[in-house]
Amino acid sequence: MNDSFTEFAVKMRQGGCNEAAIRAFQHSYENLVAGQTGMIPEASIQPVVALPRLDQITKQFRDGALLSQVVVLKLNGGLGTGMGLASAKSLLRIKDELTFLDFIAKQILDLRRKHNSPLRFMLMNSFSTSAETLEFLTKYPELGEPKSMELMQSAAPKVDATTSQPVAWPQNPELEWCPPGHGDIYPSLLGSGWLDRLLADGVKYLFVSNSDNLGASLDLNLFGYFVSSNTPFLMEVCERTAADRKGGHLAQRNGKLLLRESAQCPESDMDAFQDIHRHRFFNTNNLWIRLDRLKELLDEQGGFIPLPIIKNVKAVDPRDKKSPKVIQLETAMGAAIGCFDDAGAIVVPRSRFAPVKTTSDLLALRSDAYAVTEDWRLVLAPRTLGIQPTIDLDSDAYKLVDQLDAMLTDGVPSLALCRELTVRGPVQFSAKNVFKGKVTVTNRSGAPKKLPPGEYQDVVKELG
């Protein structure tokens, strides 16, 4: 073991990290001290020009028995702190008093019932989300024993930016650790023993997605395509729009697909990175993985997948900008597409990518722009004609979920026929507000004001 890494290894073992997680972090750390930045210059890659499309493939799912060979895993480690949440983001109320986890549980149970199959289900929790998530799942006893469905995410030591050693912060030792990114799924599956147990039970396929993306249900046709393709790794991608230009994209290098995140793009190449006509596809984080091939790759690499590092420089205490600078090393699970020789990608409809990252996203899902299907998916309502409303809420007045809830005490406005809604200042809505076309509502007073009931179509409305 590299001498400079010894302190990290000791700290991680004392912190309860398994050996697979330690090996994975060691790979990232050694890349860091070797001067590797994880940057992917534009000159080193080529655009992906064309990919197969889900809406053009032949229907291939024929055998419900295949469901016994797949496990659905949801990434559930986030707290949603960006929206002011202090609990698991998946427990946020989305629609009709149901949370993300309610919808996910109902989707799994519906598939089991329709196909009379013991479809496996797992959650990858963090130490921050585990207890309340497991408690919540007791309301669905038919899913199984909650603890038996849990994969625990690891934690990674923060690196002191000055010494390149584990940072010490006695004021709050918990702040010496950070999430390792969702690339941690691979060492966690291996180190926990889950990978071997699943394979021993005849589970050959893994479908993984974010718990806040309710569009990412197990699509049977897509599953059939993945099985017949014989590829070890399949990424669902969507075509980028102007709203996606700052997010990561798919590219290729030396004939292999790769994923480039914004943190891996040199500043000088940012124009090309944001060119949605050049780099057309983005990763939805809906991934299909052959578990036997994953095991082979892990064995070949010595127990870890050599994912590129994502380097984030922050203060050890996020609330104290004067606290020591640290480097947080993360990896992205989608980056594994570059580690399999014959990995693939498929273009899926935007309906399979409906995450909630902001209160603007949450407002759209709560409105009549989205409907709940019989199999418990949230999809654009027929009246929208497949066009998702673009919502831009004032970041000061609506950044937090509590702020949004305070503006919706009289109900959620109609957005089914809205194309763009821009809100500036604190505006209280009601179920009697109907927005159509392109609407802007402004309240410059600083104090919350109610929007009068009525229909607003292609209009700029000033409140006082």
Image (cartoon, grey):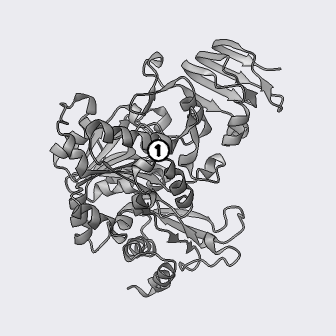
Q: At 33% from the left edge and 48% from the top edge, which residue is drawn?
A: 287
Q: Which residue is mark 1?
A: 247
Between 386 and 329, the one nearer to me in the picture: 386
- The picture places residue 209, in percent across and down from the top left corner, at 40, 48
Residue 65's spot in the image, x, y percent?
20, 44
- Residue 170 shown left or right of residue 145 in the figure: right
Quarter of the rendering containing residue 377: top left
The residue furthest bottom is: 3
Query: Which element carries disc 1, helix, strand or loop?
Result: loop
In this picture, residue 341 sits left or right of residue 285: left
* Three-letter amino acid code of the residue under disc 1: Gly
**Vertical placement of residue 101 versus 413, above or below:** below
* Badge 1: residue crowd in 10 Å (few <14, some 14–19, many ≥20): some
Q: Residue at x 66, y 20 (%)?
A: 431
Residue 444 vs residue 252, the one in the foreground: 444
- Quadrant containing the C terminus is top right
Q: Residue at x 34, y 46 (%)?
A: 250
From this view, report whether residue 328 is shown above or below residue 355.
Answer: below
